[in-house]
Amino acid sequence: MRKLVFRRPAAKDVLFFVLLGAAMALFNVALPQREPLSFCLLFAALMCGRDPFLCAGVYMLASAAAVSGEASLCCAAQAAFLLVVFALYRRFRRQPRWERIFYALAAQLPFVFLYPHAGYAIVPFPVVAQKAVLAAFFVPAALLTEGGMRALLQRAFRCRLSAGELAELCLMWLFLGMGIFSAASRYAFYALSLLLLLCAAVLLKSAACVPFAMALSLPACFAEVSALPAAAYAAFACCALPGTGYGRIVTALLYACSCLVALFLNGVFYAGGTELLFSLLSGLLPAAVVCAIPDKAFRKLRATLLFYRERTLPRIAINRNRRAVGEQLYEVSALFREIECAFRVQERPDDADAHLRARLNDTLCSRCAERDACKKRGLSESLDRLIRVGRAKGKVNLIDLPADLGNACKNVAGLLFALNKALAEYRGCAAELDAAQEGRRLLAEQAHGVSEILKELALEQSRAYTCSGEGAALSRALQERGLLSSEIFLYGEGDDLTVSMTLDAASDARAVCDVAGAVLHAPLALAEKIPLTRDRACFILRRKPHFDAAFGLAARAKEGEAASGDTHSILKIDERRFLVALSDGMGSGEPARDVSARTLSLLESFYKAKMPSETILSTVNRLIAFSADETFSCLDLAAVNLDTGCADIVKIGSPAGYLLSGEELKILEGESLPIGMLEAVHPATLRVTMKENDFLIFMSDGVTAAFGSSADLCAYLSELKPLNPQALAENILNRALQSARRQADDDMTVLTVKLTPAA
């Protein structure tokens, strides 16, 4: 015999049936003759898959309010019929479809023939005919209630409801509100419905609360047979709406004032007594409850209702595409890393001595009759010494010949000739191998740089964007300033915050940034303006860096030269970083200018691509070193972060730079050869943190040489109290020219940078 196991009902199931019973009781008193309107809820609960036995039991308990044997018998017959039907469907694990309409019609037969009904005098039909009409009304009402309950249980607070589902929920509220109006008096209904209205205004913060308020007033309109409640509720919503931007307390106060005005116009203050007291309670109690509810509860409810205000699919699609692009970039990065590994070569083993010894043996010693005698005397070590001397000097002569080898060898001249010939061939092959190795090493470094760039892009693209919910507040703030935006899209957070909005093309960008910054509590700046039509444009705002930068430049070419050999660069890497560089080509005039310009052009291109600094410097150094002419260039370079003021400084063969910070003067110098002079030049790198109103100063050697000594230059800079970077550069250059008696013996250039607070 199978043992029955009783499952303990979950808390949410218990709560559902408790609320279902209360709603059924209110539905039963919604109509004037206490008709069993709760049949709609019974049918809806069964169609939603709830337990048939529990649903039938709750329905019977709710019908007990009729206090009539015939009415209870009618409800029992209805419950028994539907219980049998839905229990069978549940037993065979099926769900009623179109045939459920016939089951609903059949369940109305007990109501038509058993339910005690006095009939409505204003309807000129027999009582049975009137009950038949009511039964015909109950069937579509039950079908609509089924849709409303399904939406309430399965879709509400999870996704956006359709217009049909909202209409079905309105019908359920109509029956429920009429039941409250009839069972608990109109004051209870007004208190509950006005509380819902006020909560909707606080949560939605939009005009959507006006139609919601009118839907809340429907039970009162039907109960009082008047449209006045709908007008009053719409007026309450419109009065409360302006205060939603200032918090729930202001919203509640505006509503309370409008409610008092409505009561005064309705003549309630003249009634006095109990009616005045209950009218004031039902009207003002919702405002007090809303003020007492914690902000945390409203924030949680607002987050739950986000589905009704935010379209999440575009964000999901954007993040999905970004993730796919990031994954693809990461794979390409791995490919370039494999290319780097393929081009990475080990240093050639030092087997030149053995190679040269074998070459001498093949060309000379193998034909000598004294070869065996030389081996017995141990002259191989002497030959190795001669080969090592030849590799060091490039060639050998009689002076380099070991004494024992010279005395024993019968063909000294042939030995020296053969070894010098082998050394010459070896040098040629070694040069070719070194060039090939260097080329492969350069390609490996480039592959490494490209791999790092792609990896950074992959990580950046893989970060998911999160949308902000401040679009409505920003739209209202813009409207108050006379700026009408038809669309606003906010995404990202922190330094990645991006605000996109469509505005009139002639809108003041500074005003737009000020309004958006005040609403989002972040300093914003216009990053891009994209024309959409002749009079509309898309404004894209990004978070403003902490600092801004101003630059100064003063230059003088060498006397007698048409062009200066010094070149400079000021490059915006991205919205938060910039690059300044000063390159001094060796010599003067056009040749030196070409060298320095070529160096800066290479550096700019690499930095724009965001390649790692160490890869950039070594690559540029090799490319300059590979040039046909012996061309060198000194370099000062600084990459500055406008958020932190951190400056990465690179100096290659250049004179000292300076950081002027208030009363303090810091010397920035390094010890390295000019770029392009040797393939293994190691740049001097240092990192400093610039503060507000600090000056960074780079000078070419023509300026520093004019001062005579670094002590004189430091003394002069320490006395300066600059305000303007351009004036500072011009003052330094003029002082250098004065020291050189107005005669520029070399190209002179001064480049200055000042950090200022972002405006």
Image (cartoon, rainbow, N blue to C red):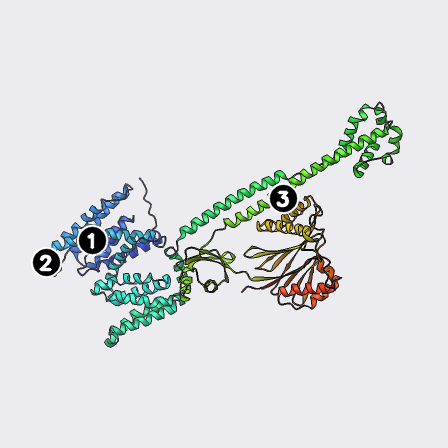
Residue bearing mark 3: 445
Q: Is residue 661 above or below residue 51?
A: below
In terms of sequence position, does the residue under pointer 1 or pointer 3 come before the other? 1
Q: Quadrant of residue 170?
A: bottom left
**Tag in front: 1 or 3:** 3
Residue bearing mark 1: 138
In terms of sequence position, does the residue under pointer 2 or pointer 3 come before the other? 2
Q: Residue at x 14, y 57 (%)?
A: 117
Q: Tell me the kind of residue under disc 2.
A: Pro
How crowded pointer 3 is (Cα within 10 Å; few <14, some 14-19, many 20+) is rated as many
In terms of sequence position, does the residue under pointer 1 or pointer 2 come before the other? 2
Q: Quadrant of residue 69?
A: bottom left
Separation (CA) of disc 2 from disc 3: 98 Å
Q: Mark 1: which secondary structure?
A: helix
Q: Tell me the kind of residue under disc 3.
A: Glu
Q: Mark 3: which secondary structure?
A: helix
Q: Nearer the viewer, residue 379 or 706?
A: 706
- Whether residue 56 is visible to the viewer of this picture, yes or no, is no
| Coordinates of residue 689 in the picture (x, y in percent) | 63, 60
| Coordinates of residue 288 in the picture (x, y in percent) | 35, 69
Q: Is residue 508 above or below residue 339?
A: below
Residue bearing mark 2: 124
Separation (CA) of disc 1 from disc 2: 20 Å
